[in-house]
Image (spheres, helix red, strand yellow):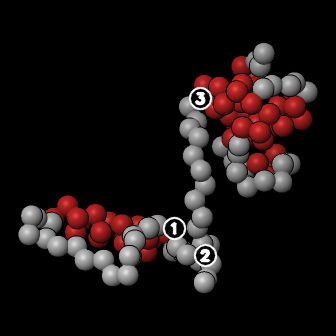
Amino acid sequence: MLTNDELKKIDKALSSSPRNTGLNFSNWTGQLIVLFVKNKFNKTIALGTAYNILHRLNYSKTRPKKTDKRVKKKTLENFWSELNGLLESKDEDTVIVYKDEAIITSEPTISSV
């Protein structure tokens, strides 16, 4: 149904924000691909076809993670590197203690309670 040229245009669009194509959204979804194809090529495709297009173009479906714009990428990378080093160097006598149900995550808290 879609030509190779149209698939190339979809691939190019998917490599950047939907906002760059005139769609007022931050992340690509199957529904947005359906809308993009309708607007750009005047063709109607099913949602399943949109997911097939993603697969054919070697994209995977992932959920966006919440991140705080203030996070310093280098600091986060250093933290994960140090943590992985500690976890890899632990032995059978190592005890990891968590206080107050602590978790280690790359998703900083963006709300307060």
Q: Which residue is mark 1?
A: 107
| Residue 112 picture quarter | bottom right
Sequence order check: which comes first, mark 3 or mark 2? 3
Image side of residue 100 versus residue 46, left or right: left
User: Considering depth in this image, is 103 or 49 the residue closer to the camera?
Assistant: 103
State left or right for residue 13 relative to residue 88. Answer: right
Q: Give how far apart the Cα atoms at labels 1 and 3 are.
A: 27 Å
Which amino acid is tagged 2? Ile
Q: Secondary structure at mark 3?
A: helix
Residue pointed to by mark 2: 110
Above/below status of 17 relative to 92: above
Please state which of residues 4 and 62 is positioned toward the viewer in this rendering.
Answer: 62
| Residue type highlighted by circle 3 | His
Whether residue 94 is visible, yes or no, is yes
The residues tagged by marks 2 and 1 sit, at their Cα atoms, a distance apart of: 9 Å
Q: Which disc is residue 55 wearing?
A: 3
Task: Tell me the amino acid under the disc marked 1.
Answer: Glu
User: Which residue is farthest top?
Assistant: 1
